[in-house]
Image: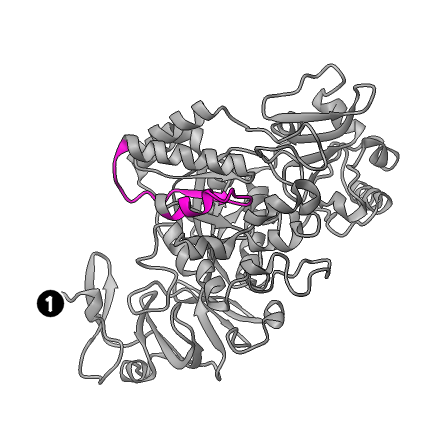
């Protein structure tokens, strides 16, 4: 006899057989595989409460002490959590996963606070390489030493023969030395590319800085890692994410490299973390051909989402605004594609049934992205689209209610607010900051706000993102009361953005994002109740266990 999900047992006596979703329907089983007892559980709604969770066949099969006790047997593994805090597994809705994974073993320039320290770290990395290898990695931040962009002259003395291509922390600039420029064939005669900039000195010679689309001039010259190298890197990234309580990430890439590496690992049965793979919007026809033959993957690795990068970044002054940058008169950013092309790709991909997200940071880029989505919806008719805008970072006043009205998800990164908040006013002034990282305004307007990291631009650590959303204290300590404090969120709002809303943003709200009977058993165990502690201690909370698909994938 079949029974609905709503009738799945959540409490009561043991005379009723435990029902679980298995295969295409419900199947009866005799007992729980694992029981987590004495836990302080936040299910994704309401307040935390002392409870228990029962797992069978990778799903949450019982919730509540009575139900778990009734359906435990001698074969059930019992884990006493001694009051530890349990919540749905964190979903990170925006990562550059392979790049972040690579950086775990590449030189990290995030802490370089001077040109001298920048050069020292690059030089040390070069000495450890074999001939022909490039120094990569990066995460440098020019704001830490006053804003001057790196120059090839900083690196040349310590890397005379080793090519260097290190990324700014926002992934929108590369800094090259002379050896790298030579290998890439970039000189004073190399023209700028559409959607990119080659920064030049007063004599017209490249300084070594490439912005946005111009970065491809260097990237195509860098020797490609092997498939085995990429898979090893992703494994390191997975282990790192699990240690931070991350049970799924959305990979918002602009190529197929990460997707192909994940598919190879999935074929080997190696994932441990779930992935939703976004592929380039321009390639929608190629993705359709894949979907027509193979479907959209499974709950470990899914695809069918498409992404386009429409503008650049605030830090690189390539985000597209209506007005020029305050600290760069005459420059208001730039689109990376013609709006007409983006409209056509969006119309076609939407008609084919794909989910679409557009990277938009500047106010003009966000308005135009909303216009593009509105036109596609009008052309193709009603359906459950779940359009997204990645970053939704600097919004015009008129844009905020449009997210709710058009049912566009704002996929945002709270850590960026406490990072950019150190210097954003220099770029765009006080007036344009009124729509910056407007988490609360969007929620108050009825929009759905999903949270991610943009790893490696920010840490793959949701707890730091939660703290950023709740406190909005900039990382330089200059805003203890919060930067633009009217946009602070409650703890529940921040956590829902990392769980419930992210599951919705990936079309998985029927099986992920909450702790409830019938849902896939993805949850995280911590040493402190996030609702009970001082929010300032959120980032110091320790992850004790990360459970994905009912199995412990990380244990402290």
Q: Is residue 254 in view from this perspective?
A: no
Please, is residue 222 above or below residue 102 in the view?
above
Left or right: where 488 falls relative to 286: right
Magenta range: 380-404
Q: Is residue 422 in view from this perspective?
A: yes
Left or right: where 350 falls relative to 152: left
Secondary element under disc 1, as helix, strand or loop, is loop
Q: Is residue 384 magenta?
A: yes
Q: Residue furthest top?
A: 189
Q: Nearer the viewer, residue 462 or 251?
A: 462
Please, is residue 355 above or below residue 349 in the view?
below
Q: Nearer the viewer, residue 209 or 71?
A: 209
Horizontal and vertical percent position of residue 250: 46, 48
Horizontal and vertical percent position of residue 110: 73, 50
Left or right: where 329 falls relative to 494: right
The N terminus - image quarter: bottom left
Left or right: where 384 falls relative to 137: left
**Which residue: 61% across, 33% down?**
323
| Residue 274 placement: quadrant | bottom left
Q: Residue furthest left?
A: 1
């Amino acid at each position: 006899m079949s029974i609905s999900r709503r009738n799945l047992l959540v409490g009561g006596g043991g005379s009723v057989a435990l029902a679980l979703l298995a295969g295409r329907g419900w199947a009866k089983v005799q007992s729980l595989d694992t029981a987590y007892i004495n836990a302080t559980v936040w299910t994704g709604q309401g307040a935390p409460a002392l409870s228990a969770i029962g797992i069978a066949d990778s799903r949450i099969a019982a919730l509540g002490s009575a139900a778990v006790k009734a359906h435990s047997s001698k074969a059930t593994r019992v884990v006493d959590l001694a009051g530890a805090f349990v919540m749905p597994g964190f979903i990170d809705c925006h990562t550059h996963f392979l790049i972040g994974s690579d950086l775990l073993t590449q030189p990290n320039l995030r802490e370089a606070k001077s040109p001298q320290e920048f050069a020292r770290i690059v030089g040390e990395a070069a000495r450890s390489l074999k001939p022909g290898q490039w120094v990569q990695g990066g995460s440098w931040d020019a704001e830490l030493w006053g804003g001057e962009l790196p120059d090839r002259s900083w690196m040349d003395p310590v890397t005379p023969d080793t090519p260097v291509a290190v990324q700014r922390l926002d992934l929108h600039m590369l800094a090259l030395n002379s050896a790298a420029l030579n290998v890439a064939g970039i000189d004073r005669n190399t023209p700028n590319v559409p959607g990119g900039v080659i920064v030049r000195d007063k004599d017209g010679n490249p300084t070594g800085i490439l912005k946005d689309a111009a970065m491809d001039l260097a990237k195509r010259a860098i020797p490609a890692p092997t498939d085995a190298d990429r898979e090893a890197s992703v494994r390191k990234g997975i282990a790192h994410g699990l240690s931070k309580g991350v049970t799924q990430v959305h990979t918002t890439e602009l190529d197929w490299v990460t997707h192909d590496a994940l598919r190879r690992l999935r074929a080997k049965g190696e994932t441990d973390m779930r992935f939703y793979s976004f592929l380039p919007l321009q390639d929608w026809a190629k993705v359709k051909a894949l979907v027509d033959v193979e479907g959209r993957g499974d709950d470990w690795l899914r695809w069918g989402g498409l992404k386009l990068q429409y503008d650049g970044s605030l830090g690189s002054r390539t985000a597209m605004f209506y007005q020029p940058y305050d600290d760069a008169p005459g420059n208001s950013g730039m689109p990376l594609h013609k709006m007409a092309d983006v409209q056509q790709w969006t119309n076609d991909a939407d008609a084919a049934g794909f989910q679409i997200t557009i990277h938009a940071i500047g106010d003009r880029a966000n308005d135009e992205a909303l216009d593009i989505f509105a036109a596609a919806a009008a052309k193709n008719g009603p359906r459950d689209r779940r359009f997204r805008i990645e970053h939704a970072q600097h919004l015009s006043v008129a844009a905020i209610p449009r997210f709710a009205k058009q049912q566009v998800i704002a996929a945002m990164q709270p850590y960026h607010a406490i990072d950019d908040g150190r210097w954003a006013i220099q770029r765009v002034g006080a007036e344009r900051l009124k729509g910056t990282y407007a988490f609360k305004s969007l929620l108050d307007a009825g929009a759905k706000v999903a949270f991610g990291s943009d790893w490696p631009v920010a840490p793959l650590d949701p707890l730091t993102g939660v703290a950023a959303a709740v406190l909005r204290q900039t990382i330089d300590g200059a805003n203890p009361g919060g930067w633009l404090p009217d946009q602070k969120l409650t703890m529940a709002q921040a956590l829902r953005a990392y769980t419930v809303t992210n599951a919705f943003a990936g079309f998985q709200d029927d099986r992920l994002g909450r702790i409830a009977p019938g849902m896939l058993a993805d949850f995280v165990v911590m040493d402190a109740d996030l609702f009970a502690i001082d929010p300032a201690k959120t980032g110091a909370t320790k992850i004790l266990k990360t459970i994905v698909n009912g199995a412990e994938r990380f244990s402290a």
